Image (spheres, grey):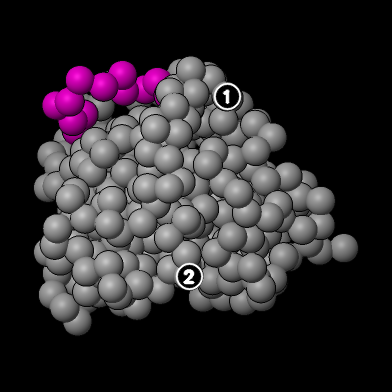
């Protein structure tokens, strides 16, 4: 691991497995009801290093027209959200890498745009629930190396990869996943010349740089003690997840796209990995993925690491083809 992950490991060791239990956490989380949880063992939840809000989530960010943005390289990834007739919005991964959650409102819909670098999981959720509209922050905790979010209203803890509350008053509540996709900045501005892009946040961060240099070619995930994926698939290989099915990205790339199980998954070159080199724009090409249904409508999906899919969908279907 590179220096950044080494430092995180040191913080995690200081937190210690013996402190992975509610008695220790209560001083930091006095509003969280730890008696309500779907987690089988507290040792599943580890400190990722930063404390509560040590990675600052964003709320109500500013946006500028595509034509006014000049800092983002053409191959850099952005998360795209398009709802109804509203202008498409791009949330650059160069910002999400450092903030992980953006609370926003698009076409009147409160959304949370999320990115967990350690799982390469990028999901968009509707923040409306039966308990009201929630907003989210970064807890600083990890489970199966995936970000644990928390809501500001009840301070319940939420698993980012599955969009479900796992600790606290709202345990068992699920967020609705919304279609969103990661594509290169070049593709976004070509498809949406009148679109909007999130402005650079006013935090002292090295935006455009990747603090997880070399991570997606590592042999093991960070702070993950679970099983490796089956079928000889590398833990940090990317897979395209739709519900409980996973298509290895290498298969999708090799076949030039796949059409099965009611979805059509396309792949085109031109997007840099955000978790490869120290500068995102210099990352190797991992391609652009889009998932649509039989009617051509975008489908909620994730392009995540294989170990995370196996951890959260242990009985899931691996779509390996021939």
Please report the bounds of the magenta region as a residue range. 199-212
In the rendered structure, the answer to whether residue 82 lies left or right of residue 143 reads: left
Q: Name the image quarter holding the N terminus.
A: top right
Q: Secondary structure at mark 1?
A: loop
Q: Position of residue 249 (x, y in %)?
A: 67, 49
Along the viewing direction, whichever of 276 and 231 lies nearer the viewer: 231
In the rendered structure, the answer to whether residue 320 lies left or right of residue 4 reads: right
Badge 2: how crowded within 10 Å, few (<14), some, or many (20+)?
A: few
Residue holding disc 1: 1
Q: What secondary structure characterizes most of the magenta part?
A: loop
In the picture, residue 261 is in which quadrant?
A: bottom right
In the rendered structure, the answer to whether residue 122 lies left or right of residue 309 reads: left
- Residue depicted at 28% across the width and 73% down the height: 35
Residue holding disc 2: 40
Q: Position of residue 277 (x, y in %)?
A: 54, 20
What is the distance, in whole Å, between disc 1 and disc 2 at their CAs?
29 Å
- Residue depicted at 26% across the width and 39% down the height: 51
Up/down of 129 relative to 141, above or below: below
> Mark 1 or 2, which is nearer the eye?
2
Q: Position of residue 176 (x, y in %)?
A: 34, 72
- Residue depicted at 77% across the width and 58% down the height: 230
In the picture, residue 247 is in which quadrant?
A: bottom right
Q: Is residue 111 magenta?
A: no
Q: Secondary structure at mark 2?
A: loop
């Amino acid at each position: 691991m590179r220096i950044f992950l080494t430092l995180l490991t040191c913080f995690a060791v200081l937190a210690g497995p013996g402190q992975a239990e509610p008695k220790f956490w209560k001083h930091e989380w006095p509003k969280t009801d730890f008696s309500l949880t779907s987690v089988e063992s507290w040792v599943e939840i580890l400190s990722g290093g930063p404390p509560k809000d040590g990675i600052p989530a964003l709320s109500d960010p500013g946006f500028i027209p595509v034509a006014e943005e000049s800092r983002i390289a053409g191959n850099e990834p952005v998360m795209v959200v398009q709802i109804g007739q509203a202008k498409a919005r791009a949330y650059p991964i160069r910002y999400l890498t450092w903030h992980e959650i953006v609370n926003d409102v698009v076409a009147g819909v409160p959304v949370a745009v999320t990115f967990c670098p350690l799982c390469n999981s990028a999901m968009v959720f509707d923040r409306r629930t039966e308990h009201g509209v929630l907003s989210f922050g970064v807890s600083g905790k990890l489970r199966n190396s995936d970000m644990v979010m928390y809501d500001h209203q009840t301070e319940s803890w939420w698993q980012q990869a599955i969009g479900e509350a796992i600790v606290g008053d709202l345990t068992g509540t699920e967020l609705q996943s919304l279609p969103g996709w990661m594509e290169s900045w070049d593709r976004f501005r070509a498809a949406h010349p009148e679109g909007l892009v999130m402005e650079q946040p006013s935090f002292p961060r090295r935006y455009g740089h990747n603090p997880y240099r070399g991570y997606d070619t590592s042999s093991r995930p960070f702070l993950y003690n679970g099983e490796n994926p089956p079928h000889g698939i590398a833990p940090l290989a990317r897979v395209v997840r739709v519900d409980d099915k996973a298509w290895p990205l290498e298969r999708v790339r090799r076949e030039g796209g796949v059409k099965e199980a009611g979805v059509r998954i396309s792949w085109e070159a031109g997007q840099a990995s955000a978790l490869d080199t120290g500068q995102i724009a210099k990352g190797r090409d991992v391609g652009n993925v889009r998932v649509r249904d039989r009617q051509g409508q975008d489908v909620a999906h994730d392009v995540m690491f294989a170990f995370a899919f196996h951890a959260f969908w242990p009985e899931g279907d691996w779509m390996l083809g021939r």
